[in-house]
Structure formats: C-alpha cells, structure tokens
Amino acid sequence: MISTWLTYLKERSPLPALAFIAAAIAIPPLAIVETFDMKVLVLSLIFNVLIFIQMRLGDEIKDFEKDKIIHPERPLPRGLLSISQVTNALYLVLGINIVAGLALYASGATLSGCLLALTTIFAWLMYNEFFIGGSLAK
C-alpha cells in the first residue's frame, strides 16, 4: 500500500516540486521580519505541501470521469488507487491540517493556527465548488 501511495505522489504530487513551491511561500515572510526560525520554516513547508496535496486529491476525485476518457494513464483511471482511498486520504489530510491549526492556536500561535485552518477550509470549499457547482454548471 505504501508503494502505491509513493507512486501516486511521484506522479501527481511530486514532493520535491511541492517543497520548492512551499518554500517560495514560506521564506518571504521570514525575510520580511528578518528572522530565520528553522521550526517555523519546517512547519510552513509541511503544511503548505499538505494543502497542495489536499487540493490535488480533490481534483483527482472531481476529474475522475473526465480522466477515464482523456487521461486513462493517471492513477485513478488506471486503478492504482480507488476513489474511496483518495477520498479517505483527502479527509485525513484535511483533518491533520485542521487539528494542526487548532494546536497552533492553542499553543499561542493564534494567527498561524487560524490561517492554517482557514486555508485548509478554503481548499475544501474549492473541492466542493463552494457548494454552487451545480448552479455554475447551468
């Protein structure tokens, strides 16, 4: 099972590329305040990458029917993972980020915790097309 998920990550959410993008998001605020804190950088990288993975997982689920026709080589259409597995992973990542946001909030990093939770919820709303996808499709 782990090798299946590693294959998925390599193909659809390559960690080196996501880490590079996450670093581009995490480093500028540290530069602005002229403070380098390795703990803050590492946590920022981890949670930014998890949010990117959350968004990709949601796209995999939403695009499954199209991908069966247009991109049958992608992980879900070719049967590497099932929609159920990807859905479970999506909610696991969402839960991890929400719990981490609450933990940051409770530990005194109030703004960081709120922003992590809000970003995670926003990504989840994107997956759900803000609950107006049906109206927009018309």
Image: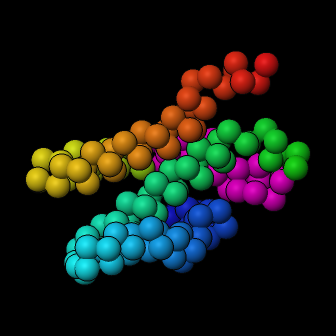
**Left or right: residue 3 compared with residue 97:** right
User: Residue 130 falls in which quadrant of the image?
Assistant: top right
Estimate the x, y position of residue 5 in percent, counting from the top left: 55, 62
At a point 41% along the width and 46% down the height, the residue shown is: 119
In depth, the one of 74 and 119 nearer the eye is: 119
In the rendered image of this protein, does residue 133 appear above or below residue 25? above
In the rendered image of this protein, does residue 74 appear above or below residue 27? above
Estimate the x, y position of residue 25 in percent, counting from the top left: 44, 68
The reply to whether the magenta stretch includes residue 41 is no
**Type of colouring:** rainbow
Does residue 3 appear in the picture of this structure?
no
**Left or right: residue 36 compared with residue 58:** left
Estimate the x, y position of residue 37 in percent, counting from the top left: 22, 78
Residue at the limit of the structure toward the right, as seen here: 69
In the rendered image of this protein, does residue 3 appear above or below residue 54? below
At a point 70% along the width and 20% down the height, the residue shown is: 134
In depth, the one of 109 and 93 nearer the eye is: 109
The reply to whether the magenta stretch includes residue 89 is yes
**Left or right: residue 62 compared with residue 88:** right
| Stretch in magenta | 71-91
* Quarter of the image with the C terminus in it: top right
At a point 57% along the width and 74% down the height, the residue shown is: 17
